[in-house]
Image (tube, grey):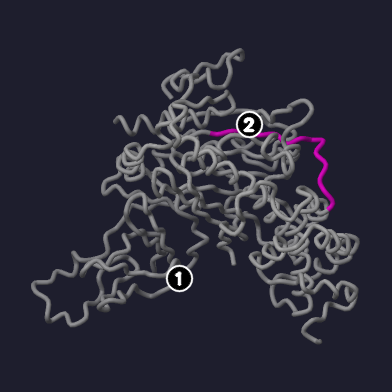
Amino acid sequence: MASVQTSRDLKWTERYPDIGTGPVPVEPYISREYFEKERDRIFSKVWLNVGRIEQIPNAGDYFVKELAVCKTSIIIVRGKDGTVRAFHNMCTHRGNQLVWDSKGTCRAFTCRFHGWVYNTDGSLRHVTDEDNFFDMDKASMGMSPVSADVWNGFIFINIDANPSESLSDYLGTELQASIAGYPFDKLSGNCFSWYTDVNANWKVAHDAFAEIYHIPTLHHRMIGNVYASKSNPWANALEFALYDKHGRVSLAANPEWNPTAVETLAGKFGDVVLQQVNTDKASFPPGVNPTDAENWSFDGISLFPNCLLYVSNATYLTHTFWPLAEDRCRWEIRTYSPRAANLAGRFSQEYGKCFFRDTLLEDGSTLERTQTMLMSGVKKEIYLQDQELILRHRLKVAERYINA
Amino acid sequence: MIESDLPKPFKDLEKYLDWSLPTERERSAKRQASDIGVLTEFYEAMLPRMDDVLGFLSEHPLDNIPDDVERLLNLTFSLAEIAPAIENFDQANVVNGYDVARFNAAHE
């Protein structure tokens, strides 16, 4: 942001005067016109996290990302040289989708329509009955490439034919420093993931996971007292930091939290998603747990525009929100932890998985109800409190792109 | 009845073998279809045995799992599945929750 004030007397939001403190408009959550602007000026221009390198560990491994918001389908593939590349999922011949599975392994991509064959580096290898084509320049007829890059094992793509900045510049030095050294590679042996199509604007879903304020109320049956405590009844964060496009929050756990019977059993053999308290400050890189809190629980990173990354002691997770229409989105969740040491550890992971999923189902309960009422048009503005500043910041960054 | 065996020390849990289901989807569906009394009975049968069960499972690596051990593991996965119903919700489903059937597990 352009200016940062750091007086202790100011609330977090007030330290970033550019984002304001007033109500914010409902229109971005309901308007088709705004959705089209997001499509053209944000999602078609910026770096988007589409997955992790563990999904394609070996040469020839690929997965397909349906990118409805950019009106395309993308193949992400690891080439023979080990490089991760992305291509539009399209045969040069007459446009058929090359890959129809959501993931797989291959030596080459063969079109099911007429049998054209492409190497995993995108080049056109073989055209069936080539003699019957005219003046064919195969060297220029490969799959259409999409910019792809990898950061801490996260694969990003950029649909723009000429991205205005590199992935590293897009992420920025402050954000990268804040998480430098976090052992993503050691914590990625086990992944649980879900997706669901929600009848809500993607930002309604995003916002539900970009603030902690709701936890003591909506999650009072599940995780209300994991974070909220007698001295911190509304689970206020330890620290916020807003960067040029992205943001971060750091949160403490309740030191007096009492686990349930099964949670206690699970805790003996493994870590459950985001609930653990880290007391070993020395074990973590300097940017993580930025306040050196004794009872740190997790840091949350908001990656503009549509990804939230939460890192804790021994697990991490991502939420990604993919726009489908102004009132529909796909919400993807991925949780990561090390491969369990034994089957008792698998039970611990399973408990953590089920508990986390049920917590997400509580979150999910508000999304369509909120969208329905925003669409009513009754209220033109909504109100954000200090602890919701990541939402306010994201709206401001989006404005910047849309008005550019 | 060979295929319904559990490892010897845990024969007493065989009456709950209908909970030994291999996927999250199946375990979740059984939870949703059960009333709280059925869930409570399973929970109360499993809980006092879990220290022994987990001690036993901690001796087993993740690969090449014998069938009887896998059935026991899936029983513990069902305990993990239903634990929030007993410990947090006091009903089978997440209270006022988003429909779990719309939540697609991509890990199975």
Q: Quadrant of the C terminus of chain B?
A: bottom right
The answer to if A336 sits in the magenta stretch is no
The answer to if A260 sits in the magenta stretch is yes
Identify which residue is drawn at 32% across, 65% down. Answer: A121
Q: Earlier in the sequence, mark 1 or mark 2?
A: 1
Residue A356 in the image: state x and y as whole percent.
67, 50
Residue under pointer 2: A213
* Residue closer to the observer: B71 or A12: B71
Identify which residue is drawn at 39% across, 47% down. Answer: A325
Left/right placement of residue A383 relative to residue A259 reads: left
User: Please, what is the three-letter code of the amino acid marked with disc 1?
Assistant: Gly
Q: Which residues lie in the magenta part?
A: A248-261
Instruction: Give the class, few, some or many, for how many residues have Cα within 10 Å of label 2's Cα (few <14, many ≥20).
Output: some
* Residue closer to the observer: A175 or A215: A215
Respond whether the residues carrying marks 1 and 2 are from the same subunit.
yes
- In the displayed orientation, state which residue is furthest to the bottom: B1
Q: Which mark is residue A104?
A: 1
Dot 1 lies on which element? Answer: strand
Real-space Cα distance between discs 1 and 2? 41 Å
Q: Quadrant of the N terminus of chain B?
A: bottom right
Find out whether the residues at labels 1 and 2 contact each other: C-beta distance under 8 Å. Answer: no
